[in-house]
Image: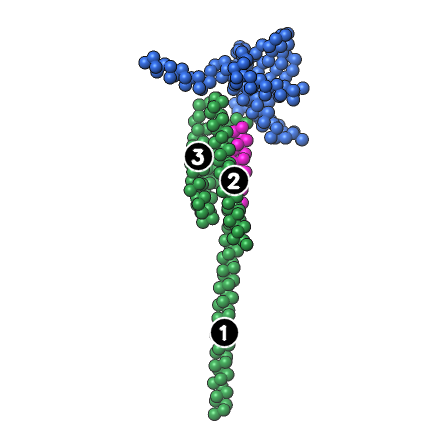
Amino acid sequence: MILHDWFDWSNSGVGVTGLALTVGAIWQATGAKNAAREAREAVHQRNAADSFAEIMRLAEQFTTWVECERWAEAVVQIREISLRLARDKGEFSRFLDSDADKLEEVESDCRKLAGLLHGGAFPLGSRAKRDLFNDSLAIAHEISGILGRIRARAEMEGK
Amino acid sequence: MSEKLDQLAQELLEKTRNNKLGWIEVESQSDREEFSVALEKEYSFHIVRVVSGEYRTIALQLWRNQFPRLEATARNWPSVGAGEDMQQVVKKFRLYSDLFDAVRESVYGSDETLGEVEQLLRKIG
């Protein structure tokens, strides 16, 4: 009788321990999964920042082409900026928050400038050049702002 | 000497924009546009723009007694050598290009002038 009780208790003990170990393993696995997801998000967010930094570099280069009146390079550059903005808007939309609309506007401005540079009435007058410089600076300014906010959000979430 | 001409280019730009200088066109070849303005004591400035495809070279020359004495040039395709600051190169090209545009518009009229003329023609009916 005593032996039987002892078996019952030990079986129960083993069962409880097994259950505890299983729960612990599940808890650990969930934690590891969450950590992996967070790490993946962090990498993705860093990729977004890197990608926008590259677009920022292209935008700065574009303003230099415009300042130097190198229209052929400028039109190639603004088309590349426009295509990259469209791609990154799709790929990194969840990190953009309210900047998604802003990005839409910038992309539209880029398309307009590409059209103007492609089919513009050259040689441009001083007023048309001035407008073009201002527009190119405005685009670089907006992209710089978006990049800054993406970096700030990444840093906040990292903390 | 080139730096001195850059300073004078800035002054020429301001005076040209304020219509204080009487630039005239100098006859030249098709890929080249040239304008000059006479000052006292036989001095004059010439500004020349040579366009070849995407390449633009703008030269500002100081003449005396019908001969060029000093020249400074700005290009939009600069070969940035060791120690040459790209920002400075771009800044110089912008100054010379703005000066050339201002001179050209003082001779031929600007977009604004054309707009005004268009309005006047419409008034005539």
Reading the image, the residue beneath label 2 is: A144
For the residue labelled by badge 2, is the local secondary structure a helix, a strand or a loop? helix
User: In percent of the image, x 59 and y 25: which residue is there?
Assistant: B92
Asked if residue A52 lies in the magenta stretch, the reply is yes
Indicate the position of residue A59 as horizontal and vertical percent values: 52, 36
Q: As shown in the figure, which amino acid type bears the numbered disc 3?
A: Asp
Q: Which chain is blue?
A: B
Chain letter, disc 2 residue: A
Q: Earlier in the sequence, mark 3 or mark 1?
A: 1
Magenta residue span? A50-67
- Above-or-below relation of B31 to A66: above
User: In percent of the image, x 51 and y 69: which residue is there?
Assistant: A25
Give the main secondary structure, helix, strand or loop, of the magenta stretch.
helix
Task: Pick the quarter of the image with the C terminus of chain A.
Answer: bottom right
Indicate the position of residue A90 as horizontal and vertical percent values: 44, 45
Asked whether residue B61 appears in the rendered view, the answer is yes
Asked whether residue B33 appears in the rendered view, the answer is no
Left or right, A136 with respect to B63, comes to left
Could you tell me how far apart the alpha carbons at marks 2 and 1 are, in whole angstroms? 52 Å
Q: Earlier in the sequence, mark 3 or mark 2?
A: 3
- Above-or-below relation of A77 to A128: below
Q: Earlier in the sequence, mark 2 or mark 1?
A: 1
Chain letter, disc 3 residue: A
Reading the image, the residue beneath label 3 is: A109
Tag of residue A20: 1
In the rendered structure, the colour chosen for chain A is green
Tag of residue A133: none
